Image: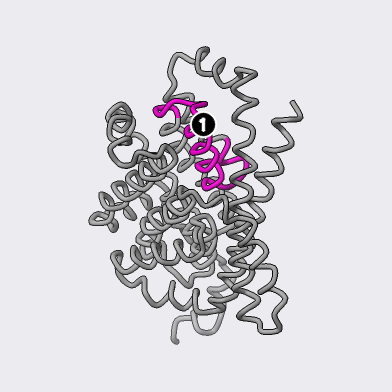
Amino acid sequence: MKEMVIPFATGLAIFLFGMQLLRYGLESLAANRLQMVLLQFTRTPVRGFWTGIFTTAFLQSSSAVMVIIIGFVNSGILSFTRSVGIILGSNIGSTVTTEILALKVEDFGFPLLLAGGALFTAPWRRLSNIGLVIGGFGCIFLGMEAMQWVAEPLKTRGWITWLLQSSSNHVMTGLLVGTLLTALIQSSGAVIVITMGFFASGLIPLAFSIAIVLGSNVGTCMTGFLAAIGSNRAAKQVALAHLILNLGGIFLFLPFINHLTVLAPLLSPHPAVQIAHIQTLYNVICSLLVLPFSRSFSNLITRILPDEIITWTWNPSSLNTPRDRPPR
């Protein structure tokens, strides 16, 4: 048990810590310009779409962008309708991380960590922030390698084999695993990295891997719902729109899981890259299908979760004010 729990927990902690370092370094480099970009370039759904792509690719986290959007909408700086384009773009922007992590870059983890640490000690703030970014990538790659160590012990114990054999529907089981695991650790990137490693080692089949990836897109919506707690109705509409978009994508792709298992080897001969490409394909298709109807989509969300209705309380004493008295 120790040979699985300790490497997995250690690798996951290093991976998530690296994501935080990377995000903090990039946010520091951007300073307040990120807020200006989100507010200035979201006047139309298409502009919001491209803004969501580049912002999420820059921050390396769709969850972080969702939290920012919900904060802006809750404060009234950004309207819910204008946020829909950013949500669609952020789903595509999140695939940049997956595509980078699909490359065989584990060997660069330790050198990047050393280089990042050296730059972080520099007296110049910008150089120090660059060091955080580089060190963050180093931690991410080291965490990926550590999490993949559990594949062999899992094969030996046969737990994954038991799960697959006891399940009558591998796809539904994969969807459930991907959703719950992502909601638990609050990182779809980590779940996809684990899936890529397990599939590359032959521990899980391709259909099960694709189902986990699809489920992780729903699990990541938990971050938006947590951020929307205690917020106004418009901010809750943002979280609901994110959930419905990803649920709709699952219902769209579920009938074609078997076709995706045939398509994946044609996209790349490398197993990990196949998973990354399927993730990218899923997000690009779902977002591009909804983009032309973004205003109709926002209207649908508003119907499901209507805007707050302001209620007025009648005060009879107000009729006694001199302004309300009829002229004599």
| 62 shown above or below 322 | above
The answer to whether residue 84 is magenta is: no
Q: Nearer the viewer, residue 312 or 253?
A: 253
The answer to whether residue 183 is magenta is: yes
Q: Which residues are magenta?
A: 181-208
Extreme bottom residue here? 328
What residue do we see at 60% from left, 69% from top? 25
Image side of residue 187 versus residue 85, left or right: right
Q: Quadrant of the N terminus?
A: top right
Extreme right residue here? 2
Coordinates of residue 192 in the picture (x, y in percent): 50, 42
Q: Nearer the viewer, residue 79 or 191?
A: 191
Coordinates of residue 158 in the picture (x, y in percent): 60, 17
Q: Which element is circle 1 on?
A: loop
Coordinates of residue 212 in the picture (x, y in percent): 47, 34
What residue do we see at 55% from left, 49% from top? 225
In the picture, residue 149 is in which quadrant? Answer: top right
Q: Nearer the viewer, residue 173 or 232?
A: 173
Q: Amino acid at mark 1?
A: Ser
Extreme left residue here? 292
Coordinates of residue 82 in the picture (x, y in percent): 37, 65
Q: Quadrant of the C terminus?
A: bottom left
